[in-house]
């Protein structure tokens, strides 16, 4: 029996959907912080949004249990706690506070103390329990280039955000647990997770959609202030944001990450006594300019963003953009890769995820209930000539072209690209 935290969240719900599909007889205890009925309703919405063909019989195999991660015994009385520990053979810990700009003590309460309490449950369970902990590829900290290893090493120059630090501290706890108990534990480190599925009301959102909501706020605020340029591509407004023009980011389709996590949740290994670290990352990086292009096309079509090492004397708009970025500006200087040795060793049965094309990025940012609007484009260039999109500063013409033709790679069925629209809505 699997127990799962974080199932109502973006990644956890995709994992739950993939797990229910992959294991048609499996029963799952979902450890959530709401009352069971509310958790079930939320799971229903979240699972539907994943796009997997699930019906009510799938949800019947899920038993919600209310827990309090802040309590050492998860808020359960000793009978319920022991019964839970006795039943489970696998424990997957997806719950986390993902606020990049949240204070460290707030993040620690969920990410570190919560993990400690889950490990307490793992110790109380049988010795054959497998423990899967969801961390992040961004524990690599301030390391700007090079290759981040699949190992627990404190970045010599520290972390970019308190979020990363809290996730690193949680990894250390998982490592101690494996070393002290001699049991198996797997730490999965996804990069930034994305989906191009349309956003459903009430369903958990990807970080890109949250960023998109921030951009939509910038547009609303500036429109109220009388500024109309942000939604008018005919007379664009330019703003600087901190970052390097050649910076790249690793993004991975959440559907692929969920599939990989399902495999890892059943990982068996003879090498015990230390936590196994596996990067869940895309083999190709995405250029930051391509990401910014998709963001502005979807939400601020009259805005041109330029990356600059430091934004001196920021304008009110530049201040607003930084405020609305929710900490994302910390990631616009990086150009590093992630070791995939363990990934390839344990997940070789999975095909590589499809490329993250400009059209995909547009869909990933698309606001609720809309199709991504086109805007005049420059520099049409060949899209696939290597391992990155870093040399495609404005690749959206390709996005439009690609949007209008069927997907070339079909390793996995995906939603149809949005239809073309010539109409742009301005508030
Ligand atoms: N999204 C990404 O791009 C990404 C990338 C790398 C790693 N990760 C990691 O993946 C995990 C899931 O992230 P996500 O994107 O799915 O985040 P999310 O959508 O914000 O979901 C977070 C989940 O954690 C639960 N949770 C948060 N605080 C809790 C608490 N105090 N007690 C009990 N449950 C709590 C939430 O429950 P409620 O629904 O009740 O709030 C929700 O189920 C996290 O560990 C994160 O660090 C995510």
Image (tube, rainbow, N blue to C red):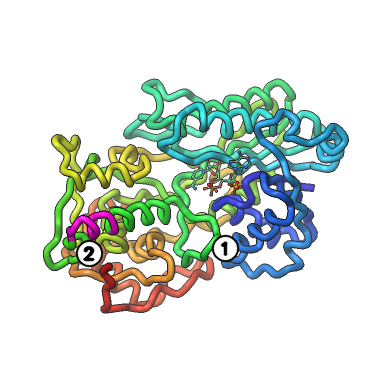
Tag 2's secondary structure?
helix
Report x, y in % for residue 79. 88, 35
Q: Which residue is mark 2?
A: 231
Relative height, residue 69 to residue 266 (above, below): above
Q: Residues within 10 Å of mark 2 (few under 14, many from 20)?
A: many
Q: Is residue 81 magenta?
A: no
Q: Residue at x 28, y 53 (%)?
A: 218
Q: Position of residue 120 (x, y in %)?
A: 73, 28
Residue sitting at x 44%, y 50%: 207
Q: Rounded to the nearest whole Å, what is the CA distance between mark 2 and mark 1?
A: 31 Å
> Can residue 341 be seen?
no
Q: Residue at x 31, y 63 (%)?
A: 298
Question: Looking at the rendering, which quadrant does residue 125 occupy?
Answer: top right
Ligand 1 in which quarter: top right
Q: Nearer the viewer, residue 330 or 379?
A: 330
First in residue order: circle 2 vs circle 1: 1
User: For residue 226: magenta?
Assistant: yes
For the stretch drawn in magenta, the main secondary structure is: helix
| Magenta span | 220-227
Q: 141 left or right of 116?
A: left
Residue wearing tag 1: 50
On screen, residue 114 versus residue 213, left or right, reads right
**Where's residue 103, x and y in %?**
45, 30
């Amino acid at each position: 029996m699997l127990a799962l935290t974080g199932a109502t969240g973006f990644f956890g719900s995709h994992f739950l959907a993939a797990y229910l599909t992959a294991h048609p007889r499996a029963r799952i205890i979902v450890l959530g912080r709401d009352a069971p009925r509310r958790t079930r309703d939320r799971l229903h919405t979240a699972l539907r949004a994943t796009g997997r063909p699930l019906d009510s019989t799938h949800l019947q195999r899920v038993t919600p249990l209310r827990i309090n991660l802040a309590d050492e015994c998860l808020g359960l009385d000793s009978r319920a706690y022991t019964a839970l520990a006795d039943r489970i053979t696998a424990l997957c810990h997806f719950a986390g506070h993902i606020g990049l700009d949240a204070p460290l003590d707030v993040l620690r309460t969920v990410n570190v103390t919560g993990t400690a309490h889950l490990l307490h449950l793992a110790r109380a369970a049988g010795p054959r329990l497998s423990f899967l902990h969801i961390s992040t590829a961004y524990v690599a900290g301030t390391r700007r280039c090079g290759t981040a290893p699949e190992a627990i090493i404190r970045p010599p120059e520290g972390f970019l955000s308190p979020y990363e630090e809290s996730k690193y501290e949680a990894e250390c706890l998982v490592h101690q647990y494996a070393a002290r108990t001699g049991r198996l534990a797997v730490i999965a480190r996804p990069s930034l997770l994305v989906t191009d599925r349309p956003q459903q009301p009430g369903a958990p959102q990807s970080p890109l959609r949250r960023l998109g909501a921030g951009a939509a706020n910038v547009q609303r605020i500036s429109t109220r202030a009388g500024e109309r340029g942000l939604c008018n591509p005919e007379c664009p407004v330019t703003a600087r944001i901190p970052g390097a023009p050649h910076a790249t980011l690793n993004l991975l389709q959440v559907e692929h990450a969920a599939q990989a996590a399902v495999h890892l949740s059943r990982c068996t290994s003879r090498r015990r006594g230390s936590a196994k670290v596996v990067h869940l990352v895309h083999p190709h990086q995405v250029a930051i300019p391509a990401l910014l292009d998709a963001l502005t096309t979807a939400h601020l079509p009259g805005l041109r963003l330029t990356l600059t090492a430091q934004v001196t004397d920021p304008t009110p708009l530049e201040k607003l953009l930084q405020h609305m970025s929710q900490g994302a500006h910390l990631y616009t200087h990086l150009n590093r890769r992630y070791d995939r040795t363990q990934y390839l060793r344990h997940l070789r049965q999975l095909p590589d995820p499809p490329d993250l094309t400009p059209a995909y990025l547009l869909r990933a940012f698309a606001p609720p209930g809309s199709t991504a609007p086109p805007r005049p484009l420059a520099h049409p260039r060949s899209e696939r000539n290597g391992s990155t999109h870093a040399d495609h500063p404005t690749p959206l013409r390709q996005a439009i072209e690609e949007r209008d033709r069927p997907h070339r790679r079909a390793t996995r069925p995906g939603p149809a690209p949005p239809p073309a629209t010539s109409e742009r809505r301005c508030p």
